[in-house]
Image (cartoon, grey):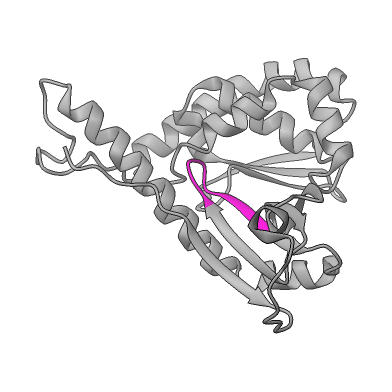
């Protein structure tokens, strides 16, 4: 079995040049002063403030999370612009990392199975291609579950979407426009464990109260769905098709 090693993709931004050595040493430079998670250009970004001179952007395994290390006094506007300008690179790096992970998992499953991968070639992992059959199946599965999910979570969250659209999405599991109350769900959720559809729906319904992923959003999610962080980790191990 070919092993795919997790890699970390890095980009850095230097605000100013300073060649003096830091008397606090490596340990002092790596010390986190503050941490927060926020949404930038539709992406969840974890920002850590440190006593450093440069800003670093990393896509970290295993779930291809976006991590930014920034100088303590760097403005939020500079960080947001830096991340936004690199959105295309971030999404490519995330897809590459998650695809590598998925391929490794599928190779492991194939090697323990007496059959062969879906493409008939035992040297390659099985592949997935959207077609009319699985589109219909995914849509039917979601539409079957939605009435009960909305009936359950509407009273808990306290707000309901005005409209839900199902579509094939290549970089996210769902999205929400709080101003209009519209929620979009990735059609792929209809081919996955039902717990993921529930998690994404609750996540997007929470955005009807909270625009970003800050303290208010996290506090509400903790109250609505206490295991949401584990569900987020689990769903992000899957490749968005």
Q: Residue at x 83, y 70 (%)?
A: 77
Q: Is residue 130 visible from the viewing direction of this image?
A: no
State whether residue 113 appears in this view. Answer: yes
Q: Nearer the viewer, residue 137 or 191?
A: 191
Name the foreground residue: 217 vs 117: 217
Give above or below for 117 relative to 145.
below
Q: Residue at x 9, y 37 (%)?
A: 122
Residue 42, how many percent across, how many down? 69, 56
Rendering quarter of residue 112: top left
Percent coordinates x, y for residue 134 in the rendering: 38, 35
Query: Residue, x 88% and y 30% (percent of image)?
Result: 159
Q: Nearer the viewer, residue 61 or 29?
A: 29
Quadrant of the drawing holding the N terminus: top left
Taking the spot 88% from the left edge, 51% from the top edge, the residue there is 179
Q: Is residue 112 left or right of residue 193?
A: left
The span picked out in magenta is: 60-68
- Is residue 65 found inside the magenta-colored segment of the image? yes
């Amino acid at each position: 079995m070919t092993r795919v090693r997790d890699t970390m993709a890095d980009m850095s931004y230097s605000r100013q040049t300073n060649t003096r050595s830091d008397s606090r040493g490596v340990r002092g430079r790596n010390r986190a002063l503050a941490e927060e998670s926020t949404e930038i250009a539709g992406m969840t970004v974890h920002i850590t403030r440190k006593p450093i001179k440069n800003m670093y952007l990393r896509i970290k395994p295993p779930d291809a999370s976006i991590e930014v290390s920034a100088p303590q006094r760097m403005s939020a506007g500079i960080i947001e612009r830096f991340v936004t300008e690199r959105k295309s690179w971030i999404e490519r790096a995330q897809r590459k990392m998650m695809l590598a992970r998925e391929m490794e998992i599928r190779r492991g499953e194939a090697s323990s199975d007496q059959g062969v991968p879906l493409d008939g070639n035992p040297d390659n992992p099985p592949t997935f291609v959207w077609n009319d059959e699985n589109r219909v199946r995914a849509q039917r599965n979601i539409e079957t579950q939605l009435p009960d999910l909305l009936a359950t979570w509407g009273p808990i969250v306290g707000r309901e979407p005005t409209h839900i659209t199902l579509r094939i999405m290549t970089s996210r599991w769902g999205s929400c426009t709080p101003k209009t109350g519209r929620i979009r769900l990735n059609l792929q959720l209809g081919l996955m464990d039902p717990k993921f559809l529930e998690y994404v729906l609750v996540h997007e319904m929470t955005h009807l109260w909270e625009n970003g992923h800050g303290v208010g959003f996290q506090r509400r999610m903790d109250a609505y769905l206490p295991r949401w962080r584990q569900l987020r980790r689990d769903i992000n191990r899957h490749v968005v098709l």
